[in-house]
Image (cartoon, grey):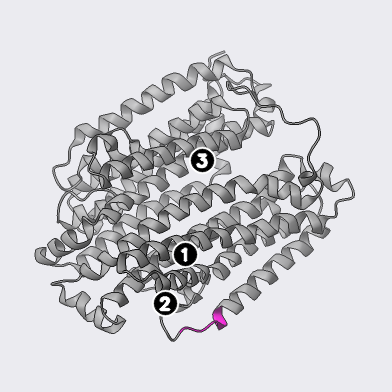
């Protein structure tokens, strides 16, 4: 029997299971750069306007820290920089996909069942990598096609698309290596995300701090240095290819050296008895969710500092651009544009916080399918108590994340304009205003878990649709009723003086109704549900 026996069948199984989630993240991430290019063509039609933007905003240290360096003043160069943050999202999606189809399958015991048939030792890792590699390359090709359709040169578009795809390939391979090191899926995700965070920090320190050699040490720093549309340095693409080959050369031998279901790193034994904090459902839920709340808060706190620091530059980006100056007059001057920038970016963080709420709500489905919920519910623990304990963190987590983001954004922006007492509460309010909309998506996840548990992952599809509507709706000039399907469409702009709290109350009530319907359904259905 070959070590790759069964790879084709496992590949088909992965494609079958990810037939919804995989196309969604590929399509969403492929379309966004095209919208950036279209916006730049409309807002900065002349070379002088693009030069003014590049000088005032594109090379602002906070913008460079968040997005990466700017190597030119063409629409293509501006688009490549604007899509810099997407590299981290592509890397995260690829990493999590591989971990889900390797270590998560082993932890759940499904890979052991499959291994009882004719299945080579390399088949599982190979199938997961092949699918993720193919998805990353498809993402790159679709990205390039979209940029060409937007009017950018074909060579630069292909360079940008391949650089994005190979970033996904590197972190997919990293996920395959992390899956060999630890016996838990959470541990593998932690290792992978930790390396991703280190890569982002190196890229940020190198680009914003003027130490370019640090950026060359980061896989997230390689794609910008391909310099799409500004020289197209194809040789840089050899770096992610070589890094992926090296990571794979380590991961494959390790996958054979360890036992199925075990990891190479020794597991730390826990105490013989649980502490008082684990005596009830809420204590157990806190133990399961506390790590995610902590790291999401740290990450979004740093993001808020960067966003707030970049806001002042937004007011200077319109110098010499009559079109944007006209918009500025309607918004109330440079401070109006800064408020519009901060409102838009905090809206995006609200969508990200909704992702945390969905993740926390779907933890219940993970506990159920892993067989840990049924023994717990066989005790005196009531179903409602168990669900409410996880629901608490599906609601509390986004609140904490947005609270930290608003505080960090307000602090950074207040320092930049010299008025912290005024800006800190304003940004805090703008961040928390996104909370009811995020709760709606978390409530939808609870509803699906309670009534249609097999379709619970569709909550992620709903989040992807919300992101698409928010990013593409204004560009494509979609009908208002379509835009109104997104709860974030109804979030008021609290940085304006004429905002109303009524939509926030309606969204919160809708989230509550969805959660109660999910609770009612869960109390009546079988556990576990297939």
Q: Which residue is mark 3?
A: 96
Q: Residue at x 25, y 83 (%)?
A: 329
Which residue is the extreme one toward the bottom? 498
Query: Which mark is nearer the camera, 2 or 3?
Result: 2
Label 2 crowding class (10 Å Cα cut-off): few <14, some 14-19, many 20+?
some
Q: CA distance from mark 1 to mark 2?
A: 12 Å
Q: Is residue 176 left or right of residue 394?
A: left
Question: Residue 227 placed where, x, y %?
Answer: 19, 43
Tell me the residue that label 2 is attached to: 495
Tell me if I can see residue 457 in this picture: no
Residue 153 on image: x %, y %: 17, 51
Which range of residues does the magenta coloring cover?
Answer: 499-503
Q: Is residue 222 above or below residue 487?
A: above
- For this rendering, which residue is in front, 292 or 440? 292
Which of the labelled discs sits on residue 406, or is there none?
1
Residue positioned 66% across, 56% down in the render: 393
Specify whether residue 184 is in view.
Answer: yes
**Residue 215's image quarter?**
top left
């Amino acid at each position: 029997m070959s070590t790759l026996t069964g790879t084709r069948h496992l590949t088909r199984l992965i494609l079958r299971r990810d037939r919804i989630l995989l196309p969604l993240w590929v399509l969403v991430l492929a379309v966004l750069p095209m919208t950036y290019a279209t916006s730049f063509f409309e807002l900065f039609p002349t070379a002088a306007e693009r030069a003014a933007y590049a000088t005032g905003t594109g090379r602002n240290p906070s913008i460079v820290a968040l997005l990466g360096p700017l190597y030119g003043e063409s629409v293509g160069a501006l688009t490549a920089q604007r899509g810099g943050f997407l590299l981290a999202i592509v890397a995260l999606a690829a990493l999590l996909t591989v971990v889900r189809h390797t270590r998560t399958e082993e932890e759940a015991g499904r890979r052991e069942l499959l291994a009882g048939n004719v299945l080579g030792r390399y088949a599982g890792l190979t199938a997961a990598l092949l699918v993720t590699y193919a998805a990353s390359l498809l993402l790159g090709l679709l990205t390039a096609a979209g940029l060409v359709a937007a009017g950018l040169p074909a060579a630069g578009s292909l360079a940008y698309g391949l650089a994005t795809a190979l970033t996904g390939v590197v972190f997919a391979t990293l996920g395959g290596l992390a899956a060999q090191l630890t016996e838990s899926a959470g541990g593998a995700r932690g290792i992978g995300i930790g390396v991703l965070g280190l890569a982002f920090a190196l890229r940020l320190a190198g680009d914003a701090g003027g130490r370019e050699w640090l950026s060359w040490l980061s896989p997230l720093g390689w794609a910008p240095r391909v310099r799409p549309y500004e020289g197209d340095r194809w040789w840089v693409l050899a770096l992610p290819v070589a890094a992926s080959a090296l990571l794979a050369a380590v991961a494959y031998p390790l996958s054979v050296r360890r036992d199925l279901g075990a990891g190479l790193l020794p597991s730390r034994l826990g105490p013989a008895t649980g502490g008082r904090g684990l005596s009830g459902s809420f204590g157990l839920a806190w133990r399961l969710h506390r790590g995610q709340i902590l790291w999401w808060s740290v990450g979004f706190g740093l993001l808020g500092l960067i966003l707030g620091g970049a806001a002042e530059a937004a007011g200077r980006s319109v110098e010499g651009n009559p079109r944007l100056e006209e918009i500025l007059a309607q918004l109330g001057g440079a401070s109006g544009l800064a408020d519009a920038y901060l409102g838009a970016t905090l809206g995006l963080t609200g969508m990200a916080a909704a992702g945390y709420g969905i993740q926390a709500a779907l933890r219940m489905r993970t506990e159920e399918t892993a067989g840990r919920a049924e023994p717990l519910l066989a005790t005196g623990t009531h179903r409602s108590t168990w669900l409410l304990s996880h629901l608490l963190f599906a609601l509390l987590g986004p609140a904490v994340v947005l609270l930290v983001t608003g505080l960090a954004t307000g602090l950074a922006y207040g320092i930049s304009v010299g008025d912290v007492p005024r800006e800190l509460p304003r940004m805090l309010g703008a961040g928390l205003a996104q909370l009811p909309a995020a709760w709606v998506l978390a409530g939808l996840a609870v509803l699906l878990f309670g009534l249609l548990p097999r379709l619970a992952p569709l909550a992620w599809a709903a989040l992807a649709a919300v992101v698409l509507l928010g990013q593409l709706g204004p560009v494509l000039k979609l009908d208002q009723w379509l835009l109104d399907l997104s709860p974030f469409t109804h979030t008021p702009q609290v940085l304006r003086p004429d905002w109303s709290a009524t939509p926030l109350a309606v969204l919160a009530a809708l989230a509550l109704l969805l959660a109660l319907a999910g609770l009612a359904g869960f109390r009546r259905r079988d556990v576990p549900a297939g």
